Image (cartoon, rainbow, N blue to C red):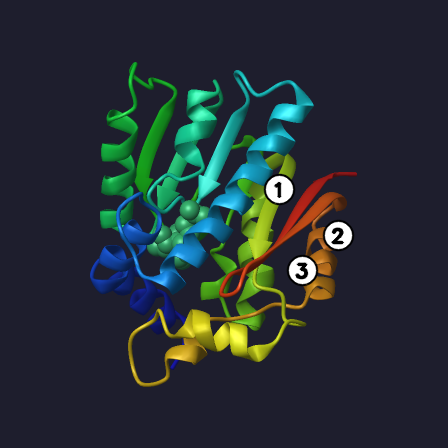
Amino acid sequence: MNFVDDKTIVRQYFNSTGFDRWQRIYGEGQVNKVQLDIRTGHQKTVDTVIEWLQADGNLPGLCVCDAGCGVGSLSIPLADAGAIVCASDISEKMVAEAYDRATAVPGKLYNISFAAQDLEALTGKFHTVICLDVLIHYPQDKAAKMIAHLSSIAESRLILSFAPKTLALTALKKIGELFPGPSKTTRAYQHREADIIKILENNGFVINRTAMTSTSFYYSRLVEAVRK
Ligand code: SAM
C-alpha cells in the first residue's frame, strides 16, 4: 500500500468511525476508561503548548497555524487568548466539529478561520506552526517531507508532537486498538526523537523546549523548534 492510500484511509477514518470516536475522546461526555486516560493525556499536551505560548507573553495577535487541528482542542483556546489562528484538518467532519465548537464559545471568536485541507498543501506564512499528534499517521519515511513542508510555512517556530519510538510497544498496541481494520497497529506510527530533531535541524531550526506526556495509554513527546 502506498502513502496516498494511507492518507486517504486516514481522511476516511476521521470522516467516519474515527470522527465519532475522537470527537468523544476530545469532548466532555462519558467515555470508557481507556478513552478517558487518552483524553487526560491529550489535554496535558494541549495545556503545555498553551503554557509555553502564554509564558512568551506575545500570544495576543500571534499568527498561528494549527495543522491537523482535529476538533479544535488547541485552536479554540489559542484564539480565545487572542492569537490569530488558521485551523485546518484533512477531515471535513473534524473541521466542521471544530467550527461548531468555536461558534459555541461565549463571545464570538473572529480571529479563527477553518479549512478542510491536507497539511502538506497548506500555503502562507505563520509566525508559529503547530502540529499535535498528527505524525502518528505518518510512516517514518514520509515524516521528513511532511515536516519540511510545515517548516516552509513557519517563519519563527514549529511545534510538533509525536509518539516516541523508545517507549514500550504495548502502548502503541493500545493506541492501535483505537483504529479500525485487521492490522490496526500498523496505522499508528512511532518516531525516534533523534530522527525528528535531525529533520528539524535540517530545516534550519534549533530545539528550544521539550516536554513529555505519559499516561497509561497516551504517550506524546512535544518539541518546540525555533529558527536559528
Ligand atoms: N491536532 C489535534 C489535537 O491534538 O487535538 C488532532 C489530533 S488527531 C489524533 C489527528 C488529526 O490529524 C485528525 O483530525 C486527522 O484528520 C488529522 N490529519 C491526519 N493527517 C493529516 C494531514 N495529512 N493533513 C491534515 N490533517 C491530518
Q: What residue is shown with label 2?
A: 201
Compared across the picture, whether 196 is left or right of 170 comes to: right
Q: Residues within 10 Å of mark 3 (few under 14, many from 20)?
A: many
Compared across the picture, whether 48 is left or right of 19 comes to: right
3D distance between C-alphas at marks 1 and 3: 12 Å
Q: What residue is shown with label 1?
A: 158
Tell me if I can see residue 138 in this picture.
Answer: yes
Give how far across and how far down residue 139 sits, in percent: 51, 71
3D distance between C-alphas at marks 3 and 2: 9 Å
Q: Residues within 10 Å of mark 1 (few under 14, many from 20)?
A: many
3D distance between C-alphas at marks 2 and 1: 11 Å
Q: Nearer the viewer, residue 218 or 190?
A: 218
Is residue 41 depicted above or below 155 in this figure? below
Q: Quadrant of the C terminus?
A: top right
Give how far across and how far down residue 125 sits, in percent: 53, 32
As drawn, the label of residue 196 is 3
Query: Which tag, 3 or 2, sits closer to the chain's start?
Result: 3
